[in-house]
Image (cartoon, rainbow, N blue to C red):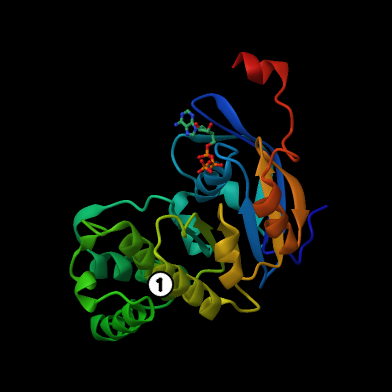
Amino acid sequence: MSNSNNLLTIKDLYASVEEKQILKGLDLEVKPGEVHAIMGPNGAGKSTMGYVLSGREGYTVDSGSVVLGGEDLLDMETEERARAGLFLAFQYPVEIPGVSNLEFLKASVDAQREARGEEAISSADFLKEAKAACKKVDLPISFLKRGVNEGFSGGEKKRNELMQMLLLQPKLCILDETDSGLDIDALQVVAEGVNSQRSSDRSFIVVTHYQRLLDYIKPDFVHVLSNGKIVKSGDASLAQELEAQGYAWLQTEPTEDELEG
Ligand SMILES: Nc1ncnc2c1ncn2[C@@H]1O[C@H](COP(=O)(O)OP(=O)(O)OP(=O)(O)O)[C@@H](O)[C@H]1O
């Protein structure tokens, strides 16, 4: 039975892409206010997990269930998932040339307000909020006028995603390798941004390869995702153990079918 106190319950999730099964019995329970770190070897299925939760095209759920805030997430369209409070910061944020960052952010915020039965925010009020968010993530306000992620550096894209998170105030934030490619200052900006958003009713799933990020964002739980499922869970000390020992001691052996491809 899934625990109804959970914000997110993933149960025995199997999912594939291009007919290749990537998630193979993934279980994860996240309570409101918790921060879970997901680590694991390359190709284990960490990004796939995020894409499946977001409802990205091309990712097929074969079996299992995902419940967010008491609702069946897998039954929802992509936009509905965002309205239900899911936010994903991707490893490779997309560029949307021709659409200004400000327009895009306002449209996202208004869609959420509409779903809550609220009126669209006025342009003047939104501009004020967006400027404050820029300041928090240390991006010049000129970035609001630029095309979404258009020509942004890797670190600027990550800061921009964080800004989106600050404005959307989601219930569940999934950060997929938000630390990769960040310089030390940017890493701290991202970590401070996340920490400032931590609250008893907001949860985070932080996918990372590096213990370093977890020095700044202290997780309540650390999980190792290997070969499509969680193979080990622990507290923050598990990340240190992994840093010292790698993953070899945890990896499940591939089956003969998998070896044959
Ligand atoms: N479109 C696709 N077609 C075929 N295989 C795919 C596709 N997308 C992902 N995969 C495969 O799915 C597996 C899991 O990929 P995923 O990106 O989820 O891993 P990851 O754990 O996030 O890895 P990393 O740590 O390297 O980012 C990989 O073997 C990858 O090659």
Residue 180 visible in this rendered orientation of the protein = yes
Residue 138 is situated, as x and y percent measured from the top left of the image, at 33, 77
Looking at the picture, does residue 248 appear above or below residue 116? above
Looking at the picture, does residue 254 appear above or below residue 127? above
Q: Disc 1 residue type?
A: Asp
Residue 93 is situated, as x and y percent measured from the top left of the image, at 36, 53
Residue 217 visible in this rendered orientation of the protein = no
Residue furthest toward the right?
A: 1
Residue carrying label 1: 185
Disc 1 is placed on an element classified as helix
Split into 4 quadrants, where in the image is the C terminus? top right
Q: Quadrant of residue 100?
A: bottom left
Circle 1 packing at 10 Å, graded few (<14), some (14-19), many (20+), is few
Residue 62 is left or right of residue 181, and the answer is right
Name the residue rendered at 63%, 45% in the picture.
Answer: 40
Residue 150 is left or right of residue 184, and the answer is left
Q: Decide which of 62, 51 is in the foreground and name it.
A: 51
Name the residue rendered at 78%, 55% in the picture.
Answer: 2
Q: Decide which of 71, 30 is in the foreground and name it.
A: 30
Q: Quadrant of residue 31?
A: bottom right
**Total numbered circles:** 1
Name the residue rendered at 65%, 20% in the picture.
Answer: 258
Residue furthest toward the front?
A: 244
Residue 111 is left or right of residue 72, and the answer is left
Q: Quadrant of residue 157?
A: bottom left
Within 8 Å: ligand 1 and the Cβ of disc 1?
no
Residue 134 is situated, as x and y percent measured from the top left of the image, at 32, 77
Residue furthest toward the top?
A: 260
Residue 4 is situated, as x and y percent measured from the top left of the image, at 76, 63
Looking at the picture, does residue 124 appear above or below residue 236? below
